[in-house]
Amino acid sequence: MTTVEVFNGSCGYLTRVVGCRETADIICISVSTDCQSVRQWGLSIESVDWQSCLGKNAQHSTFWQSAFDILQHRSCPVIAGVLRAIETEMDIAPPADAQIRFLPVG
């Protein structure tokens, strides 16, 4: 089981994502947050084929289509958090924190 937390500074919501390998190809995703659209998206990706959302034609997967249809913001960092949880749970990437920081002008 892989658990990640994503904090979006813009909206202030904290999201917890849990990924659990079900089979060699399928991962179960659980999303908990106070953000209504992320919560709704989480319900649509409860079971995903990891190769379809990370593979060559990922943009055509139900994972990405549901993100585009449901999420309010294309740049929502929860998308990256879910993908990182999937990669880690499927042993294709090590668990490692990521950051986006805005630097002062000047």
Image (cartoon, rainbow, N blue to C red):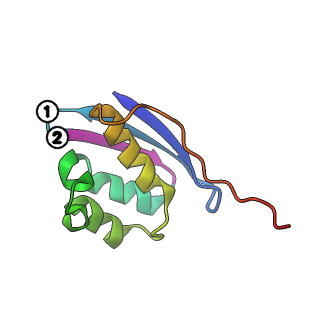
Residue contact at pointers 2 and 1, CB within 8 angstroms: yes
Q: Amino acid at mark 2?
A: Ile
- Relative placement, left or right, of 5 versus 10 is left
Q: Report which residue position mark 1 lands on.
A: 23
Nearer to us in this view, 83 or 15: 83
| Residue 71 % position (x, y) | 41, 67
- Relative placement, left or right, of 21 versus 39 is left
Label drawn at residue 40 = none
How many numbered circles does the render carry? 2
Nearer to us in this view, 35 or 79: 79
Q: Quadrant of residue 95?
A: top left
Classify mark 1: residues with Cα within 10 Å, few (<14), some (14-19) or many (20+): few
Q: Is residue 30 magenta?
A: yes
Q: Is residue 99 visible?
A: yes
Q: Amino acid at mark 1?
A: Thr
| Residue 32 % position (x, y) | 43, 44
